[in-house]
Amino acid sequence: MPGCADRDWFEVTTFECQGGVARHNANDVWFAESADPELTLVIDPAKLEAGWVLLSASLVMDRGGASAYLVVTTTDGQRLFSLPATSKGRILELIQLPEGVTRIALRPLVSSGSFSLSSVRIRRVGRWDRWHLMWRRVLGTFWRTPSARRRQAGLFLWTPVFSLTHAYRLAGTFLAYAPSLSYSEWLDRFEQFTWRDRWQVRLKSWRLQSFARRMRVILDVSGASEMLVQRTLDSLAAQVGVSCETWLLDQDGAFIPAQSQKASDYSSDREVPDWTVWVKAGCELAPMAMFWIAHELRMHPETELLYSDHDYLDAKGYRHNPQFKPDWSEELALTTGYPGAVFAFRTDRVGREYTPAAGYALLLQLMVDLPASRVRHVPAVLWHQPDSVNAYVPDLEALRTHLRDRGVFADVSRTASGHLRIHYPKPISPPLVSIIIPTRDRLDLLQPCVESLLGKTRYPQFEILVVDNDSKDPAVLDFMAQHERSGQIRVLRYAKPFNFSAINNFAVQHARGELICLLNNDTEVITPDWLDEMVARLMQPGIGVVGAKLYFSDGRLQHAGDVVGPGGCAHHLHGPLARDEPGYMDRAVLAQDLSAVTAACLLTPRELYQSLGGLDEKNLAVAFNDVDYCLRVREKGLRVIFTPFAELYHHESVSRGKDESPESKARAQREVAYMRSRWAHVMRHDPFYNPNLSYVRPDFSLSPAPLVRKPWCWFS
């Protein structure tokens, strides 16, 4: 075995493929056709002796949420070692090889997909070298990771003192591509309701006993078997710390007392409780659900609607498919009813007559004139829905009626995923839209962008403003001159150094349109009604920004909205899904409120843009200026909407390429620092990204350190 001073790397260049994985055209790109593909590393057996080794590789995942493992086979069985990677795909991981190693394999993905693999190297490490590498990762994690998330993951300052190896593994969970937790692993780690939790709930429940008398449960039993009804009643009887009266709502809309209650207790003369908890029969409440609901309502008396996360129960009673929901998104609630089959509301928001099996219709009724500030989301799984229980299906006619009663005469259709789509009416007098396209050279991008706008866009009122940032290519100059002479575009000259914010602000000063559409020059129109869709949504009350759905040129998803915080600053949601993939909770194919959308295709009123000072050309010359603008729009009380029904191609950043100069890196660091300072409160919790989901990467994988405070714990 080599000594501790041996630092020689040996490179792995030969692999044996297993699990349906194949190399593309003899280069570094591979494709896996099935889950858990493996590449056996062909290594001299003499190199497989027991001891610590350092594995280095470049592994770029094609899909978000991918997880890499090293599979080590010995004479006694198999062991899996996680291989966390940086956001750029670099793996540098210490592995302790056991005795009797016969095979080492790389498992780059846990599902089908493509990846690129290169520079696979291994070397032996000695004790001091190993300690140095471990301490470097641990201390680096302490520097860049919020303390609350470190604590939740169990990584404290003293952890490496007692077990440096354990601290090293914990620190690896905060790298961009640390292997994801399965839901069963996540439940074991974060959702055990122990005897200590029960004891703390009971100690704190005295505060809520009198408050609980102001609550009631209505159990919708329509269409449910006695067994399903009993399952829900049993879960209500098993509540810890808090209980309240329960009434069954039968097929005829009549109230029936549950358990020991008397029918005479419910009469027109009796005082109606302040809050009602609506439950669909068959759903099972977690033991602490009523305590948590009562606590939230007591602490936030302004609440008029409260909902929580939930998951599903299979035929054997195992929990799966968690629905970690966003905070209140009116647009998403209208088309999906995503609060689900259990929610609480102020009783006086609705009449005393209820229609059975009308959970979605009841939710629509509650949404009338409901400010977002009066909706409370509990980011915890407070109930479980059996797979056999039919959820409330969004009713097309109910939504049409709801919109009509609010003065919105929109059409409604059902999508392929079973949700609803609102076709907002087009303005009678369509406002002029000024489409602003910054560019420099690259006729191969500008020409298809402009020609797709002119040839495919159905919207009747728009002008195209091409902002030329010092182009030199004669072909580009000739193309712009020809189209300018024909009156199809206007060309604005901007001869200063590249500053994306300043370029767009300059163009807006010359725009004639009532609405401004910021558009990258590397985009192409796909759906002819893209601008009709965006304008119709922007004209709805309270909307300040509308963003589109963008695809890479190969058809994979490039943008379905932005999230602030996960990934380190601001990132696109989902990852590169296939065009028709629905994404987490179908959110990649649904219109919804979000914190931000990309300026690669963004529509906003010119008056609003100018009143906010446009894009921040001082602090955010190149990156994050669109996110900052959207956050300022939301700060003003207006909403930012993503619509998947306006579709364009976007060859992201190819027009400018990558600038890796020291000046560019320094500028990028300054912009990130500004965003983290200016929007720290949003980065701690983006309202449209559940805190139970990963904040290391914005792909809706489960968090290794969810920041959810349980109300019975002492620190809350």
Image (cartoon, rainbow, N blue to C red):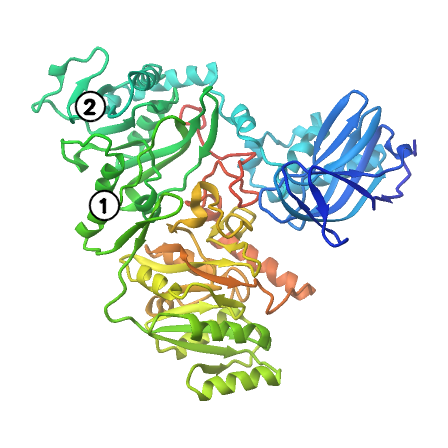
Q: For mark 1, what is the residue?
A: 397
Q: Which residue is mark 2?
A: 250
Residue situated furthest top in the rendering: 260
Q: Residue at x 71, y 32 (%)?
A: 81
Q: Amino acid at mark 1?
A: Glu
Question: Left of 123 or right of it: where is 703?
Answer: left
- The tag earlier along the polypeptide, 1 or 2, is 2
Quadrant where the image shows the N terminus: top right
Q: Is residue 154 left or right of residue 634?
A: right
Q: Quadrant of the C terminus?
A: top left
Q: Residues within 10 Å of mark 2 (few under 14, many from 20)?
A: some
* Observer able to see residue 320: yes
Q: Residue at x 56, y 47 (%)?
A: 567
Disc 1 to disc 2, C-alpha distance: 23 Å
Report x, y in % for residue 363. Answer: 26, 39
How far across and down, in percent of the image, does residue 259 sit? Answer: 23, 12
x and y, in percent, of residue 256 in the image:
18, 18
Q: Which image quadrant for residue 423?
A: bottom left
Q: Which residue is at the far left?
A: 269
Mark 2: amino acid: Asp
Q: Which residue: 19% across, 23% down?
A: 250
Q: Secondary structure at mark 2?
A: loop
